[in-house]
Image (tube, coloured by chain):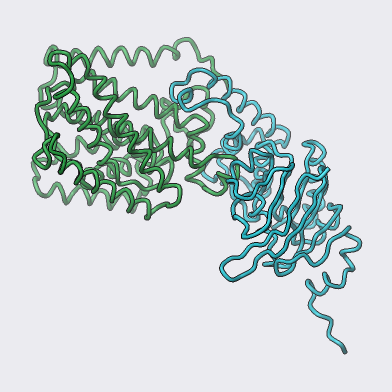
Amino acid sequence: MDEPREGKLRWMPAVFLAAGLAVSFAIPQYNLLNQYVQLIIMYAGINIILALSLNLINGYMGEFSVGHAGFMSVGAYIASFLTVRIFPPGAETLLFPVAVTAGGIGAALLGLVVAIPSFRTRGDYLAIVTLAFVMIVKSALENIDAVGGARGFLGMNKMTTLPWVFLWTVLTVWIIRNFIYSNYGRGVLSIREDEIASSLMSVNTRQVKLLTFTVSAFFAGVAGALFAHVLQFINPRMFDIIKSTDMLVMVYLGGVGSIAGSILGASVFTILLEVLRPLEAWRMVLMPLVLVLLMLFRPRGIMGLREMALFVPSSDKSNSAGKVKQA
Amino acid sequence: MTQLRAERVTHYFGGLCAVSDFNLELERGALMGIIGPNGAGKTTVFNIITGVYRATEGSIYFDGDEIIGKTPDRIVAMGISRTFQNIRLFNELSVLDNIRIAHYAGSRYNPFEALLRIGRYKAEERRIREHSYELLALFNMDVLASTTARNLPYGQQRRLEIVRALATGPSLLLLDEPAAGMNPREVDQLTDFIRWIRRTFNLTIILIEHQMRLAMAVCERLMVLDFGAVIAEGPPKVIQTHPLVLEAYLGEKVPV
């Protein structure tokens, strides 16, 4: 029931972190994988962050947001504007983590704004609100000349590297896991299960919703900032409802309410998109078809409401946000 | 000492008057029953006291503080907890999580401590966990801690709802039809059970009941609601033979 783990297992996360970091440094340094594969790995990492972020609201809280493209774009624009226009030349590589964090914070503030309608509406109605939010952000960006308007914004250096993607992905997993296995996270789950009963069991549902939208939007913003510094060019059209749909596919493919599911869904989605590239237009037929089949046969996704033991804190092993599937 | 006082509470759903001019004075430690036919407004009274509905008119004071207008979570934190007529557990979560969620207001760490697992987080989580296990053990449910709530048998689900309500640390407990779906033998056990939790947790209890059997056996005082209005009030013996109550339950006496 309690914390002290066997000596060996206790060092596992640190070892994993060090090894992962070493590998992510070594790959570009010694060209262990070609540029194309490296790029795919970076996109996979960014997509994992996005899927985790969206899963917090659509999976764990049981709401339905299609607004994450909006949060992502805000993060992308803020970070890009900082690295290109504000930071002194030469120092922008050093200050890159600051730019990414700032992008996340900007998105988180907007998350607060979107959380307020969620006090009164749920389900379909909240989905419409977030849909409107995406449109508002997109047209606002199209009309701000300082960031290039509809033409887009460029001039970013390729500062997103494998080690950065690795670090941010691990940080996202860790923080979202901490959140879920806390009082606040249990509040999130109880809102999904029965919102009225939740507030009658002393959960401050407004506080929980504000917090969840803030954390979720923060990481969507971080993903946007990383994305902008891989692609080195962004425009408002990249962050329309289609982008949100991609995130939904990742979450519902991998599994709602599951960290392992988000990682799986995002990775499979990213790889599948590349593997199917030779099919050209047919790719866009095949992907939705996969989704239809999934909804028919496994509506909660591959890992729906189940978690790998790896992502459950040791103090919480016996029970959790669903059944723990021993990995 | 008066713990709960309701003054002229009236509630409308559109044009329908669900509760009209409801007055109540409840002593600390009392065990009171609210009975009445279907649709009499019993559950509405509970929903008003716990903040689910905001009464159209009137005031309710709990330990001297007005509670109408407060959100449900604030009211629970003040010490009023409840169960539901049709069980409303967090079905997909474990028994332990159901209990831990009820500790939300009582926990003392902030979001930053939770996200980074620093400060008071660990000690508080341990306290919440241990308190939850103690409560479950008291009701012989600790072995079920990791069972998913929906997989519990019906009787255990009812029991878990009561444990969950107690986990919020109430001084006033509202039980909404606790005997629903129970057979006569189980109802007799429930009588002892209710008396036992009152003693053990030092509670004031209001009980909504459909079955006269339980209400008569366990309550010291009864209040009868019909069409949203209180038609009679007093000790069970008096209520049992009260003409208005008989009329409400059995219909008007037809002159032969």
| Quarter of the figure with the C terminus of chain A | top left
Q: Position of residue B69 (x, y in %)?
A: 60, 49
Of all residues, the one furthest to the bottom in this rendering is B256
Q: Position of residue A11 (x, y in %)?
A: 41, 12
Residue at 84 percent of width and 81 percent of height:
B253
Q: Position of residue A297 (x, y in %)?
A: 34, 51
The green-coloured chain is labelled: A
Total numbered labels: 0
- The one nearer the camera, B198 or B153, is B198
Q: Position of residue B168 (x, y in %)?
A: 65, 37
Q: Is residue B180 left or right of residue B73?
A: right
Residue B151 in view, yes or no: no
| Quarter of the figure with the N terminus of chain A | top right
Q: Is residue B56 left or right of residue B119?
A: right
- The one nearer the camera, A75 or A283, is A75
Q: Is residue A227 left or right of residue B2?
A: left
Residue at 19 percent of width and 38 percent of height:
A272
Residue A173 sits above or below residue A24 on the image: below
Of all residues, the one furthest to the top in this rendering is A7
Residue B231 sits above or below residue A198 on the image: below
Residue A70 in view, yes or no: yes
Q: Quadrant of residue A76?
A: top left
Residue B221 sits above or below residue A101 on the image: below
Q: Quadrant of residue A250?
A: top left
Residue at 43 percent of width and 35 percent of height:
A211
- The one nearer the camera, A177 or A268, is A177
Residue at 62 percent of width and 36 percent of height:
B144
The cyan-coloured chain is labelled: B
